[in-house]
Each structure stands twice: as C-alpha cells, then as structure tokens.
C-alpha cells in the first residue's frame, strides 16, 4: 500500500474520531420531548438519555388513580428516550461523515 494513502487514511480516521467526540459532547445539549395523555404529561430528555424535565398538568393528577399517572409518565419517558436515541444516532452519523457509509450503517450501542 502507498505510504501517502495510509497517511491520508490515518488523518481522516483521526478527524472522524475528533468529530465523534465533539458530537458526543453536543448530545447533552440536544433535548427532545415525549408526551402522553394528549400532552398532559411531558418529559424532556437530552440525547445522552438523561431526563432533564417532567411537566404534569394539574388536571391529570388524581390521587384515586395514581396508576394512570404513572403509566402516562412511563409512556412519555419512553417516547422521549426513543426520540433521543434516534437523534443521537443522526448526530453521530453526521460526525462520521463519509466513513459512516463505509461502515455499513453503523449501529452505535447506547444511542
């Protein structure tokens, strides 16, 4: 193999690695929202799968039916986590640039 080609390949790999680190750092600042109960329960999650906010409308709080509220919170949280995972994967694919295509649709664990 040509030494110049190998040098270029190594430089490109190093750039992708740097871009991926920057993208991972950026993920904490990207938030998505999941909702349930017609928007009565909203959960905001960042793209590192950390819950950053929970909002519950007064009308949905019924001490006699706490199970419904628990189900709404779970549903909104799961929706937000799914959205965050999809968004995180998009950001990482962007960071990988053309090399992402070479790796056959990389599926990153935890994203």
Image (cartoon, grey):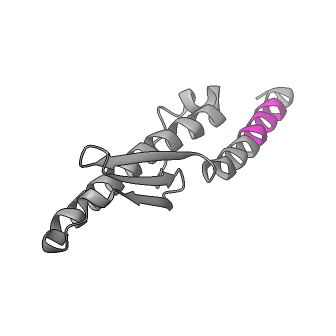
* Picture coordinates of residue 16, whole percent (x, y): 71, 39
Q: Nearer the viewer, residue 14 or 94?
A: 94
* Picture coordinates of residue 109, whole percent (x, y): 46, 53
In this view, the residue farthest toward the bottom is 63
Question: Does 46 sit left or right of 54 as displayed?
Answer: right
- How many numbered dots are placed on residues in this image? 0
Q: Is 46 one of the magenta-colored residues?
A: no
Residue occupying image coordinates x 30% and y 50%: 40
* Magenta span dominant secondary structure: helix
Rendered position, 13 above or below 43: above
Q: Nearer the viewer, residue 17 or 72?
A: 72
Q: Quadrant of the N terminus?
A: top right
Q: Nearer the viewer, residue 39 or 89?
A: 39
Question: Does 18 sit left or right of 86 as displayed?
Answer: right
Q: Is 14 one of the magenta-colored residues?
A: yes
Residue occupying image coordinates x 33% and y 47%: 35
Residue occupying image coordinates x 57% and y 32%: 100
Question: Does 5 sit left or right of 33 as displayed?
Answer: right
Residue range of the region highlighted in magenta in the rendering: 6-16
Quadrant of residue 28 in the image?
A: bottom right
* Picture coordinates of residue 89, whole percent (x, y): 50, 41
Question: Does 69 sit left or right of 54 as displayed?
Answer: left
Residue occupying image coordinates x 72% and y 46%: 22
In this view, the residue farthest toward the left is 64
* Picture coordinates of residue 77, whole percent (x, y): 35, 56
Quadrant of residue 83 in the image?
A: top left
């Amino acid at each position: 193999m040509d030494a110049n080609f190998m040098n270029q390949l190594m430089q490109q790999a190093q750039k992708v690695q740097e871009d991926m680190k920057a993208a991972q750092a950026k993920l904490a600042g990207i938030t998505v929202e999941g909702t349930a109960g017609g928007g009565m329960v909203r959960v905001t999650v960042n793209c590192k799968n950390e819950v950053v906010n929970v909002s519950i409308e007064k009308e949905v709080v019924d001490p006699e039916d706490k199970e419904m509220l628990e189900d709404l919170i779970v549903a909104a949280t799961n929706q937000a986590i799914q959205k965050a995972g999809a968004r995180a994967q998009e950001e990482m694919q962007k960071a990988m640039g053309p090399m992402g295509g070479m790796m056959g649709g990389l599926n990153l664990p935890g994203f």
